[in-house]
Image: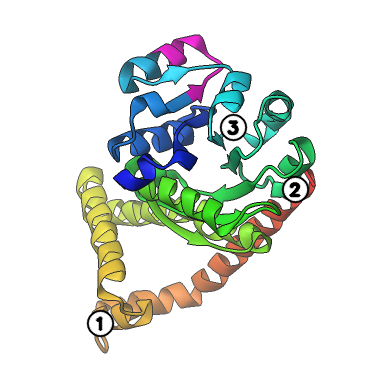
Amino acid sequence: MTDSTAASPTTRTIAIVGAGKIGEALMGGLLAGGLDPAAVLFTERYPARAAQLTALYGVRSVEVTEAAATADVVVVAVKPQDIEPVLADLQGAVRPGTLVVSLCAGLPTALYERSLPAGVPVVRVMPNTPMLVGEAMSAISAGTHATDEHLQIVENLLAAVGKVVRVPETQQDAVTALSGSGPAYFFFLVEAMIDAGILLGLPRNVSAELIIQSAVGSAKMLRESGEHPVMLREAVTSPGGTTIAAIRELENHGVRAALLAAIEAAAVRSAELGRAHR
């Protein structure tokens, strides 16, 4: 987060409602980016954890109603099943002009707009767990009353913990399936590749080191080279070599089709969860 954003009146005070893993990761990223701890509030229902976070970050724990009445930006980062009591607390406390940012998977902006005072701007965010290491991929969507200025505020906040794209809210189920759940697909593949190394006689720690570093290096090549994944794959695939033999087996076993079907199933499930709150 830039100094100019941190000093902006529209982001003078930020409250994070729900300091679980994602909420804490965002808070840590904002503070590491230079935001004054005095400008950050958080809510946490377990007193012991609240005390731990206050000691660690130097930020103040408050009740949801105080967070809503005080903050210029209220970031809701609770589990979707816990949203109803949070909305009830926000409803009577949110001030006009407060920006509400939802990090709750599957919850549409319309749910907030029905519950909060008329005209409150809401921005929906689908982050993912690499936020915990400052490498999140977040997609943001404007609600009915959110403007480009509101989206820019949210982009600036989330830039402290990774990359951000804007999408229409109608695409959020696809985003959830692709990048929201995406880390799990990579972990699944890495797990399988480590097991393959063990099958071939390598010690687990050696196999894990080989695959994890290969994954890190490959991701860096994708980001920095600007090349299409096909081009990078073909650069590894020599005629008649080991890689093409492996690719043939992946195609024979329908790995590409399985990935497409898996991601489509995740999008369908995201839409089902969202409809429960529409």
Residue 131 appears left or right of 99: left
Residue at the image position 29 percent from the left and 77 percent from the top: 243
Q: Is residue 91 above or below residue 192?
A: above
Residue 135 appears left or right of 201: right
Q: What percent of the width, then of the height, locates residue 201? A: 23, 53
Disc 3 residue crowd, few under 14, some 14–19, many 20+, Cα 10 Å = many
Which element is circle 3 on?
A: loop
Amino acid at the residue labelled 3: Val
Residue 21 appears left or right of 246: right
* Alpha carbons under labels 1 and 3: distance apart: 44 Å
Write the start and end of the magenta stretch as one range: 42-51
Q: Is residue 225 visible?
A: yes
Callout in the foreground (2, 3): 2
Q: Find disc 3 in the rendering and name its residue.
A: 78
Q: Find disc 1 in the rendering and name its residue.
A: 235
Residue closest to the eye, 47 or 174: 47
Amino acid at the residue labelled 2: Ala
Which element is circle 2 on?
A: helix
Disc 1 residue crowd, few under 14, some 14–19, many 20+, Cα 10 Å = few
Residue closest to the eye, 140 or 190: 140
Callout in the foreground (1, 3): 3
Picture disc at residue 110: 2
- Determine whether label 1 and label 3 are within 8 Å by CB: no
